[in-house]
Image (cartoon, rainbow, N blue to C red):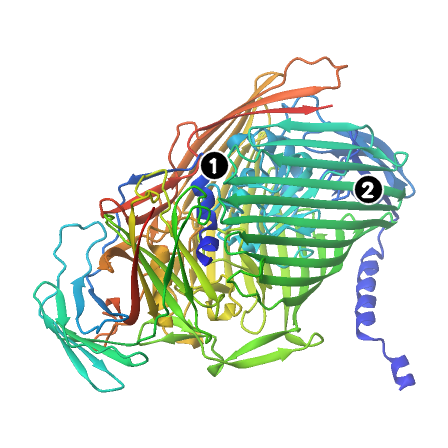
Amino acid sequence: MKNYIQNFGLLFLALVVFACEDVIDVDVQSAPKRLTIEASLDWEKGTSGNGQTIYLRTSTDFFDTASNTAVTGAVVKVTNMDKGSEFSFADQDDGSYTTTTFEPIVGDTYALEVNYNGENYYAEETLYPVPDLTVVGQSRDDGFSEDDLEVNMQFVDPQEEGNSYFFKFQKEGALLPVFEELDDEFVNGNKIDWYYESDEDDDTDEMEAFKPGDTVFIEFYAISPAYHDYLQILINQIGGMGIFDSTPVSVKGNCINLTDPENYAHGYFRVTQMVKASYTFE
Amino acid sequence: MINQRKGKIPGPLWASTLLLALFFGLNLGAQEKFTISGKITDQNDGETLFGASVFLEGTSIGAISNEYGFYSITAPKGEYRLLISFMGYTGKYEEVVLDRNLKINFEISEQSTELNEVVVTAEEPERAVLRKPEMSVAKMNIATVKQMPVVLGEVDILKSLQMLPGVTNNAEGTGGFHVRGGAQDQNLILLDEAIIYNTSHLFGFFSVFNADAIKDMKLYKGGIPARFGGRVSSVLDVRQKDGNNKNFAMTGGIGLISSRLSVEGPILKDKGSFLIAGRTSYAHLLLKAAGEDNTASFYDLNLKTNYSINDKNKVYLSGYFGRDVLKFGNIFDSSYGNTSGNLRWNHIFNDRLFSNMSGIISKYDYDLGFTMEDFVWVASITNYNLKYDLKYYFNDRFKLDFGASGLLYDFDPGQIRPTSDTSSINRLALDKKRAFEAGVYINAEHRLTDKLSAQYGLRYSNFSRLGGQPISNYGNDLPVVYNADLGIYESGTAIGETDYGKGETIKTFGNFEPRVALAYQLNDASSVKAGFSRFAQYVHLLSNTAAVTPVDVWTPSGEYIEPQLSNQYALGYFRNFDGQAYSMEIETYYKTVDNRIDYIDGSDLIGQNTIETEILNGESRAYGLEVLLRKNEGRLTGWLAYTLSKSEQRTPGGRAGGSGINNGEWYHTPYDRTHDISLAGAYQLNEKLSFGANLVFQTGRPVTYPNGQYMYEGISVASYAPRNSDRLPAYHRLDLSLNYKPNRRPENRWKGEWVLGIYNVYNRKNAASISFGQNRETGANEATRTAIFGIVPSITYNFKF
């Protein structure tokens, strides 16, 4: 809902006959490289959650497509702060670090430690339980367009306030996923209807509406309020910021650099419970 | 007790006695003097004329008619020739024998051809321009605004104003305007004295002012008289026509986007007149996917009537109602608009004392309907204003304005109402806020010597944030704290609320606002002027987006938000060449604003009850040089405006800790424009044909581009450079227009004209924004430019009968 209000002007511009969009060459500034930590310890409900992977990379120039960004030689460790148990992640020499012994426990707080290039990075995160998500079918009349297909879902938000969610949708065969976030600020304790419609883009044809036979993969995560704040900015800035958007900012995650605070890491250390679903349109 | 009181004159009375003694003291020892007063009106339609000059030939005694056409001049006993002049009108004179007080009303008529029409008149003829201390003022002639080339043929006074030095827009197709590096919410915009909170139709493609209903407008970029208050950057004073009190008349036009019709005429046995003007857009022409799914349209209605009770009393009633209606698919619809009304009473106490009392209501509101989720979101700002203004024409060297104003605000920052029982959205209402703003002022126009004139005054403003709502308290009294670990600003820890009853006052602010301007006439053709003014602004528009949108809400100062305070210094040189055929105005200014709100990274203003947790207190400054060269006479008229300027802001962390926004360093405001050049010209070929042209060049808007990327969650995420440290490419375009008035017989009442226009003749794709993202098919990052208007031809037919 906030998205619609935020993008009110954008929605309007998109409809205006005279407005035109084209891709152009632009010179941009070049920031020093930073470590990027993608530490997403996601526990699929009903599984053990023992196998987990953390990715370490570096940032690059904005238009760079060639650089190898994998970071190797780092030491990566996760600790359960409540129980004291430790999980080391083994360097796979391709930027990924893995473990097979992780034990996810709802309500527990975990700490991530990364030692890279003589600098220590640190983050903490708590694991929240995820409600069940029911895929209830498809429809055409919901969503932005009355003609296009969307998949409908339902879940129940718990009575207590402060729950946040993250949706990841990926159409089979699509290169990029689509993210959505929600907190229970306006909907606390309710049965919540959600839908996902692949918004058709007339100008670029980069996105197409769903057709019968298309499959969409759905991932639904319970996330911490802090991670929600992070995602909200990140998702809002995906696809760029226009004239009716707020000034874009470098979104800051929770991985702090204990050695040199200015040299913080991009990315986030999250520990979540999640459910997966898929739907094939009829 | 009683005796004691008798012996002491109460403070206010004492002050007014002193004041009176001062006025009359000034009169002592003068030779016998008499006063001529009256009204100046248009011969054809009876509209009162604002800014016409009245002079006694061979003397330096003169006056300018006020907003209601009233003038008053006082001179020693004698015989004079009284001259009346007004730009675009044929002058008039009358021989007078001044041996008693006289009342003389003048009717003057518009010049038959528009050859001599001056496009922008900086107030009035030669001597006065140079001599009056008033500076930084731009007045626009509506007839000229109507002839300037405009996008889609929609005449727009706000777009025309942007052709003047020191006035810019944010981006093409966005609303409002910026004056001398000031923000949009720092402009006080008045339509018949009512505050207009949002000047935009369709996000700013067009403005809310229907030129057919407007008599005149005046933009004060600085040197704002003490009678205005409440905003720190500028005042745009727009006045509606009173309505033709001689004949019944209709004016209208048919354009590509909208149609207009206005009706005016005398009423009540010619003791009054009325004007009703309406405008409505064709809902679908603007939109790509026109149809049931998406619509966008607007309409507005202007009303005005007046009635002369007698020579000394006249009442006016005016109103405005405008609305935009938008619908986006079946998910989302919205409507928003302004409503205002003003009841005025002009009373002339005597030939030297003029007064006006106004009771004004104005409101801006919007609603958003979420069809699918079954709820609506509404928000509004309403104010009630009572003001009383007096002008005393003491003598030819001294005039005094004084008055008082009270303004009551009701802020409704947002309510959510589910529209069905099955809606998954909970009912919610953000706290309503109330405030009262009072102002008293006194301002003198004083000719100290034949060469030196001064305008000096003082305004005292007082703002009370009224109770009737809870205010959150925070740990260490910090609504925003710096999280040193993560390097971000975040909400402070709420530790309960203080509930204020309706009768209580939450916080009160008071400010003295001195205003001084001096003019020194160097010779017959040139003068120098200097000014200082201080302003206080108590209400703020909350907007963290590059361009203001219709859903941004206003918020009052209070516990956590301080009033904006500004000091402006200006210096100017004014010169006429070749009589007054050419003129040159050069001004420089320096302006500072304290307590400018700035928004923390990732601030969330939508549905935010505790705005204080999203903002930090900063400051801004702007300085610049403005040059305006005009050709005022001949077949070719027009002007060249050049502005060199800088506008910056800075927001340190302050008590919240940390180094502040953008590391506490000065950064460009989004409306900083290093260079801004506007060339506007009109050429009158003959009585039937005239041409107009605009050429505009501007430095690109400061923006924030990415400075890197990283992979996260399967996508490329951009990291961004410091705020506003990049710039869009330069903006420039050329517009042309042709105005054709077909042959018409003098006896024929119907007068029609065609206006053909081409906007952005060389079809430059000026970037309104450039956004950065990943191509969803290739995965490569790319920069996408959004250009609002390429080449846009237009045709409009206007008529009058």
Observer-nearest of B641 and B128: B641
Local crowd size for mark 2, using a 10 Å CA cut-off: few (<14), some (14–19), many (≥20): many
What residue does disc 2 label? B306
Both marks 1 and 2 on one chain: yes
Local SS, label 1: strand
Local crowd size for mark 1, using a 10 Å CA cut-off: few (<14), some (14–19), many (≥20): many
Q: Quadrant of residue B99?
A: top right
Q: Quadrant of residue A163?
A: bottom left
Q: Quadrant of residue A192?
A: bottom left
The residue that appears at 36% across and 75% down in the rendered structure is B483
- Above or below residue B382? Residue A142 is above
Q: Chain of mark 1?
A: B
Residue B511, percent across and down? 63, 68
The residue that appears at 74% across and 44% down in the rendered structure is B67
State which tag comes first along the sequence, 1 or 2: 2
What is the three-letter code of the residue carrying label 2? Asn
Q: Chain of mark 2?
A: B
Residue B524, percent across and down? 63, 38
Residue B733, percent across and down? 42, 33
What residue does disc 1 label? B678
The answer, for residue B69, to whether it is visible in the render is no
Local SS, label 2: strand
What is the three-letter code of the residue carrying label 1? Ser
Observer-nearest of B743 and A239: A239
Pick the quarter of the image with the N terminus of chain B: bottom right
- Above or below residue B151? Residue B111 is above
The residue that appears at 12% across and 56% down in the rendered structure is A68
Left or right of B751 on screen, residue A119: left
